[in-house]
Image: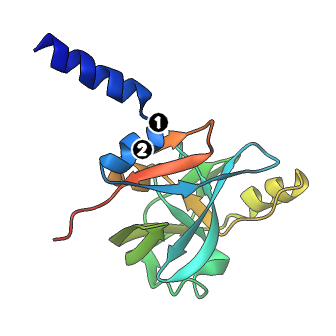
Amino acid sequence: MRTKIALSLQLLLKMTLKKYLKSKDYTRTPLRLTATNHFEISAKINGITGRFILDTGASNTCIDTDKLTYFDLKSEASDIKAAGAGAIDMETLISTKNKIAIGDWTYKKLSIVVFDLTHVNTALINHNALPVDGIIGADILKKGKAIIDYDKKCLFLKKRKKS
C-alpha cells in the first residue's frame, strides 16, 4: 500500500499543473498582463468577442453600458448599486440569460451587471493600457472552479457537465 502511495505521489510531483488540470477536465485560457498589472482575457458574450479584465475582487461579471447593443444584451432596471475602482452608488441594469464562452469553457444562463465603466477605462488609458468592454468577476470564477496560474499567465476553468 505504501509503495502505491509513494509511486502515485512521485508521478503527481513530476506532473505539471497544466497536465494535472487537463486530466481533471479543466480548460486553459491565456491571460495578458496589462500595463496596469491587471490580467486581461478574451471572452465571448452571446457569440461576440470582447476584451475583459479578470477581477477576483469583483463579485459579478459586468459590461459597460456603451456595449449593450454590441453584445446583444437585453436589460432591465436593477436595484443593485455598483461600487469599485473609486466609484460608488452607480446605477446599474441587469441582463439575464446570456451565454459566455472563455476559451472552450461555456455557461448559458449568465446574469450580467451593466453599468458605466468610463472611470475604469479612463484609468486604463491614463496608464497606457487599452480600454475594456467589461469585467469577468468572481461569479464566473466560482462557477468554473477557477485556478489562476500567475506565473504562466493562464486561467483554468473546469468544463461543465452536459445536462
Judge by depth and name the residue closer to the eye, 149 or 90.
149
83 left or right, relative to 19: right
Q: Secondary structure at mark 1?
A: loop
Judge by depth and name the residue closer to the eye, 18 or 48.
18
The mark tally for this picture is 2
User: Where, by quadrant of the figure, is residue 3 drawn?
Assistant: top left
Residue at position x 59%, y 88% from top? 69
Q: Amino acid at mark 1?
A: Thr
Look at the image and name its color scheme: rainbow
Residue at position x 61%, y 65% from top? 134
Q: Is residue 75 above or below residue 117?
A: below
Residue 95 makes an appearance in the image: no
Q: Secondary structure at mark 2?
A: helix
Percent x, y of residue 113? 49, 66
Verify CB contact (< 8 Å) between mark 2 and mark 1: yes
| Residue bearing the label numbered 1 | 16
Q: Is residue 79 above or below residue 96?
A: above
Residue at position x 60%, y 37% from top? 150
Q: Is residue 124 above or below residue 163?
A: above
How much space separates mark 2 and mark 1, taking CA atoms?
5 Å
User: Where, by quadrant of the figure, is residue 68 drawn?
Assistant: bottom right
Percent x, y of residue 137? 50, 53
Q: Amino acid at mark 2?
A: Lys
Judge by depth and name the residue closer to the eye, 57 or 84.
57
User: For residue 19, which numbered disc appears in the image?
Assistant: 2
61 left or right, relative to 70: left
- The residue carrying pointer 1 sits among few (fewer than 14), some (14 to 19) or many (20 or more) residues within 10 Å by Cα, namely few
